[in-house]
Image (spheres, rainbow, N blue to C red):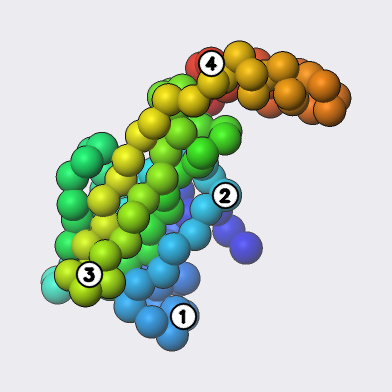
Amino acid sequence: MKYLVTAQDAVTSLTRMPTLKGFCGHTHQPKIFEVTDENIAKSVTPKTGQAYHLTWAIVNPGSVGQPRDHRATASYAVYDSKHATVRFHRVAYDMERTMKDMKAISSPKFLIDRLFDGI
């Protein structure tokens, strides 16, 4: 499977989906990939708290544990199926505790260090 980083990357997945809306992860970056009415693929970096109407799209809610968008907070999204909207949220979490717990289970140092930078 290919990482969905650009809108063009998402086109193949969008055209193969059995539904008009899909949700994925793995890149740890909040993003909406969609095809517009003009059949143009585009990528949207969502703003926290803003609702986005979805027509034909793949949504990546971000990451609650290893953000990779230079923001050291947990990122998640809530989908409202009645209105076909998604809203992205950010919340702070006890990063010191998380780092301590990761050290206790011998997580790789680079994963522990990147929490503060969000990269």
Identify residue for label 1: 16
Distance of mark 2 from mark 3, alpha carbons?
23 Å
Q: Is residue 77 left or right of residue 17?
A: left
Residue kind at label 2, given as amino acid type: His
The amino acid pointed to by label 4 is: Phe
Judging from the image, what secondary structure is the residue with disc 3 in? Answer: loop
Distance between mark 4 and mark 1 Cα atoms: 37 Å
Q: What label sits on residue 95 in the rendered view?
A: none
Name the residue that disc number 2 marks: 26
Horizontal placement of 90 versus 36: left or right?
A: right
Residue annotated with mark 3: 84
Where does label 4 land, which residue? Answer: 116
First reached walking from the N terminus: tag 1 or tag 2: 1
Query: Of the residues under marks 4 and 1, which one precedes in the sequence?
Result: 1
Q: Residue furthest bottom?
A: 18
Q: Position of residue 24 (x, y in %)?
A: 49, 59
Q: Residue at x 33, y 78 (%)?
A: 20
